[in-house]
Image: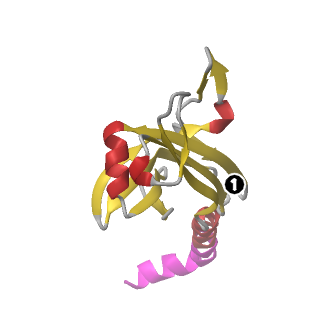
Amino acid sequence: MKDILKTIESFEGIIGALLGVIITLILTQVLKNWGGIKTYVLEWKVDFFKPDGYGGRDTSFIDEASSASLYLNIEIYNGSEMPKILRDIKFSFYNEKLFLFSVNPNDESTARISAGARRSDPLLNINIPPKQIVTYELSNYLSGHNLELFKEATTASIEMREHNNKLIKFKLF
């Protein structure tokens, strides 16, 4: 036992230096990942349309609507020192706590007019550099069965998953 203690005493400085380096590396990595994703809704609107002889018109009455257009302008801030990725982005609708349906939003930055119709690509993922904020304009169009379910919705949210599959959920109404 005395031999073991003498051996440890002779390497005391080396052991202390190694422990200090290891603890510093671990704390540095933890601090780099410190900080999370923050979301800010800049604008959220729903426009309702009802048919007429000229391709449809706005209406303020949800019961008259045959379609609806969803629009969300959102800022997302990455508070950590590591890049973050968000996946599985969707608008989700609930009646109280009962899930009704969800739709994937389209990225308005890819919008174009083709053959007289406005089109945009679905938003598949968002890459956010460290300590930066990104702005996205998202949209979708509801009709038919989804519109009927939307009329029953009491809450809506935007939902995304982080790289570690953690759900980020932000209430819209």
Q: Which percent across, then down, holds residue 82?
A: 64, 54
Question: Closest to the observer: 171 or 140?
Answer: 140
| Residue occupying the point 42% across, 48% down | 64
Relative depth, front residue between 90 and 95: 95
Query: Can you identify the residue that label 1 sits on?
Result: 130
Up the image or down, 100 lies above or below 11; here it is: above
Q: Residue furthest right?
A: 132
Q: Residue at x 31, y 40 (%)?
A: 145
- The total of numbered circles placed on residues is 1
Farthest residue to the left: give it: 98
Amino acid at pointer 1: Pro
Dominant SS of magenta comes to helix
Which residue is at a point 31% across and 67% down the rendered structure image?
Answer: 96
**Where residue 98 sits in the image (x, y, percent)?**
26, 61
Q: Is residue 129 visible?
A: no
Magenta stretch containing residue 3, yes or no? yes
Q: Badge 1 local density, few (<14 within 10 Å), some, or many (20+)?
A: some
Tell me where the magenta segment starts and ends, as one range.
1-18
Please say if 80 is above or below 72: below
Residue nearer the viewer, 168 or 99:
99
Residue 8 in sight from this viewpoint? yes
* 28 relative to 106 in the view: left or right: right
